[in-house]
Amino acid sequence: MRLDFSPHFLRSYHKAPEHIQRAFDKQALRLLENLRHPPLRAKKYDEGQDLWQGRVTGAWRFYFKIAGDTYQLEEIKARTQSKRRRAVLRFLQRRCDDHRIQNPPD
């Protein structure tokens, strides 16, 4: 297997923070070794477009297609939180704030 980088991927990669670039480089080597390597958590992301997703870090993902013996890297980006997750986090933050107001430190 080999890697092929789209122009869009390369632009996104160069805009990413340096520690994300290093983490991706490590994950790219794992991808070449074994698509099912546990830290990659590679999975089919979009069946219709034959697009796969791999994990860079907890907050960053990369997207690729498989064509023959080539991984065509399409995108690397920070993962966005769902509306539900953002709502839950706001709720928990308000609860913590309320608790601090009702129970001030001694």
Image (cartoon, helix red, strand yellow):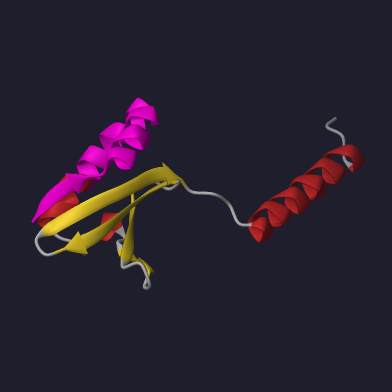
- Residue 59 at x, y = what percent? 46, 45
Residue at (14, 60) in percent of width and height:
34
Which quadrant would residue 98 be assigned to in this image?
top right
Residue at (91, 42) in percent of width and height:
102
Classify the position of the N terminus by image quarter: bottom left
- Residue 21 at x, y = what percent? 30, 33
Q: Residue furthest bottom?
A: 47
Magenta span: predominant SS is helix
Above or below for 25 versus 81: above
Region rendered in magenta: 1-27
Residue at (34, 33) in percent of width and height:
11
Q: 62 or 9, which is in the foreground? A: 9
Q: Residue furthest top?
A: 18
Residue at (17, 47) in percent of width and height:
4
Q: 89 or 52, which is in the foreground? A: 52
Judge whether residue 12 is colored magenta.
yes
Q: 67 or 20, which is in the foreground? A: 67
Classify the position of the C terminus by image quarter: top right
Q: Does the image show residue 18?
A: yes
Left or right of 26? Residue 9 is right
Q: Does the image show residue 56?
A: no
Left or right of 15? Residue 22 is left
Above or below for 57 versus 16: below
- Residue 104 at x, y = what percent? 87, 34
